[in-house]
Image (cartoon, grey):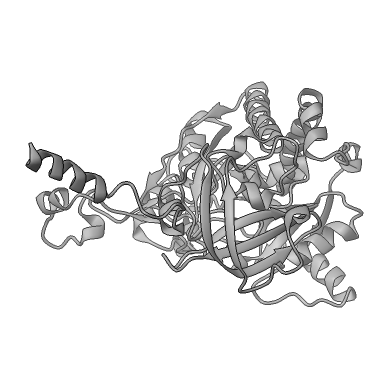
Amino acid sequence: MYISTFTRRLNTLFKLNESYKKYSVIAAVLKKPTVGKVTEIKGWVKNLRKQKDLIFADVSDGSCAQKLQIVIPKALATNSLTYGSSVHITDGYPFNPRTTHPPEYTRQYLHLRTRTNYMAAILRVRSSLTKHIHDYYTLKKYTNINTPILTSNDSEGAGEVFKLQPDNEETVKAMMQENKDRDSVYFGSKTFLTVSGQLHLEAACRGMGDVYTLGPTFRAENSRSRLHLSEFYMLEAELAFCKTIEQLQLAIEELIKYIFVNIRNTNEADLFLIDKKNVSPTWIDKQFITITYDEARQILQKKGTNVADEGINKEQELTLVEHCDGVPVFVIKWPKDMKSFYMKECEEDKTKVDALDLLTPITGEVVGGSLREDDYKKLKLKLPSEKLNWYLELRKFGNIPTGGYGLGLERLLQVLCNVHNIKDTIPFPRWPHNCDM
């Protein structure tokens, strides 16, 4: 009896899940967020950023390397709150129903931010956008092709790919072969997450006519800019018997205007909720402007900015749109050393290719496209790898001229909704050092 009582007392005294501390350490909060419960932390302010109505404080308590960002209404903050201040904070559910929270704040709570009116409205527009895209291509008799997410191709040739291999060591050991490294053990060759479905679409186009795909795309770019994501959705289309860049331009312009008109009809209330100043664009009834790459350089030079060897940068893209009074502008006839191997040379200038970028307000480039090189001998000289011999072989049998384009869905949403940061156009954004959930 006495032993049993003593044991119970010891268990009570040393019960590990009941800390003697009456507040949480930041390491524990970050590891297992206590959504829906009141949380207390204590620590020191390591950084302060003040906005109109809110103060963002990065707080550390020494329990881990990370800091916890705290959002404080200015009305609750004292003038004595500075770098190094010790603080005692009590918090609960992160969103106040009577407060409009800035996107920078709600982005910390990806699992909860769809409960905000702002994000819910954007995602409804995104859903309608996807529907209107499929409606347009159905109307135009395109066939929807599901291109693979796993591929041995790096069609852009930039090397910004995510490489795949099995995580299970037993699988790797069981499948290992002579003369094969770990990267090739599963599929027999290096395999990546797709950066584009274009090459597969070209194969389908030569048997089915006009085709398109809409699906996830992955880029291992070390960029956290307001216009880049590591995972995003790409609309790609390939047009059979497309012989001129003008055909491609007309197809893209028609698609963009179809989407904008229909979104205005179906999601007017959502667009107003997202941005009360978001009115129908003035260019919707105007023809898109076309300039050559050389003309673009001349315009920029007159404005006091020189184009680097790498090409037109983002700031310069937006300058060109502004120069055209906010009307989307096609930049065509690009130097071939700036573009991919599959693009067709211009007949009148062999140093250029029949390629285009469509520039719009807010994002700059939103569409890229080109005529494809359909001459077997010319393409063979430019082919970057023997692994693409299948792509070359498409030109051997029943060959036709084709052209195509890729459109970034999230960037188009930025233009549609007047959203500054691309991370607020997708439910669960992924970018360098951020792949939560």
Residue at the image point whose x is 47% and y is 35% from the top: 204
Is residue 194 something one can see in this rendering? yes
Give x and y (percent) for residue 85: 62, 70
Residue at the image point whose x is 47% and y is 31% from the top: 207
Q: Nearer the viewer, residue 274 or 233?
A: 274
Q: Nearer the viewer, residue 237 or 104?
A: 104
Q: Nearer the viewer, residue 65 or 342?
A: 65
Marker count (numbered): 0
Residue at the image point whose x is 74% and y is 54% from the top: 76
Query: Quick check: 402 left or right of 152?
Result: right
Query: Quick check: 42 left or right of 307?
Result: left
Picture quarter with the C terminus: top left
Q: Nearer the viewer, residue 25 or 161?
A: 25
Give x and y (percent) for residue 69: 58, 58
Compared to residue 149, the image places residue 124 above or below, namely above
Instruction: Residue lying at the far front in this picture: please name it.
Output: 2
Is residue 367 something one can see in this rendering? no
Picture quarter with the N terminus: top left
Give x and y (percent) for residue 282: 91, 42
Compared to residue 421, the image places residue 64 above or below, namely below
Query: Quick check: 255 left or right of 163?
Result: right
Quarter assignment of residue 84: bottom right
Query: Quick check: 138 left or right of 32?
Result: right
Give x and y (percent) for residue 286: 90, 41
Quarter assignment of residue 211: top right
